[in-house]
Amino acid sequence: MTLHSDIAALAPTVTAKTVFAAKGINLAGSLASIQQDVVELQAKIKQIVALHPNDSVLSATVNAGGSGGTNGQVTTITGTTGTGTKFQAKGVISGGALTAITSITNAGSYTTDPTSLTAEPIVGGGLSSATVGLTMSGDLAVLTSLSALLAELA
């Protein structure tokens, strides 16, 4: 016989606890074990959230070079939208326009991502109307999901 057929054969007055006991399953012990696992999962999720609280910039590429920049290496280009610490980068200006991002010097720490990841306005190097495309870490989306899961388990 299977558990399914055993359950189907039971009279309506038999409780689930009796069915589990008949199979040698300690229902109270199993539930206590599951509750302990949930507590441990909650603690791990809280640790993850504490380690990675915000999104950051992984890479940036020139979208629109803008104008008015000072030709040569530019040591500080800074993002302008989003909430939190804005990213900073180094780049190259040629013909008054931003032509390349050479490195991310500060990935930032965003509690709200920049408004447009494909056209983030930047300042620095005397540039006007320059924008870059950003690739973000995605931590914020992951943490939002983990936080929702934590709330369901609580």
Image: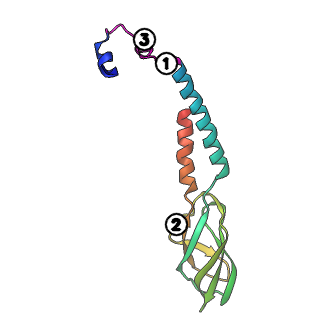
Q: Which residue is mark 2?
A: 116
The disc, 3 or 2, on the residue closer to the chain's N-terminal end is 3
User: Residue 18 bears which disc, if any?
Assistant: 3
Q: Give the magenta-colored segment's residue range.
A: 11-28
Number of residues whose C-alpha sits closer than 10 Å to that of mark 2, classed few (under 14), some (14–19) or many (20 or more): some
Q: Quadrant of residue 66?
A: bottom right
Q: Nearer the viewer, residue 105 or 124?
A: 105
Q: Are marks 2 and 1 in contact (CB under 8 Å)?
A: no
User: Residue flagged by tag 3: what amino acid is it?
Assistant: Thr
User: Residue 105, relative to residue 99: is it above or below?
Assistant: above
Instruction: Return the residue at label 1.
Output: 27
Residue 15 within the segment the image draws in magenta? yes
* Between discs 2 and 1, the one toward the N terminus: 1
Name the residue: 52% across, 23% down.
Answer: 31
Answer whether residue 74 is magenta in the image.
Answer: no
Q: Which residue lies at the image location 52% right of the left edge and 46% below the top edge? A: 145
Inter-mark Cα distance, 3 to 1 = 9 Å
Pinpoint residue 92: horizontal percent, then vertical percent.
63, 85
Q: Would residue 18 appear left or right of 38 to someone viewing this image?
A: left
Q: Is 146 situated left or right of 78 in this image? A: left
Closer-to-camera residue (150/74): 150
Q: CA distance from mark 2 to mark 1?
A: 52 Å
| Residue 99 point in image, percent of width and height | 57, 85
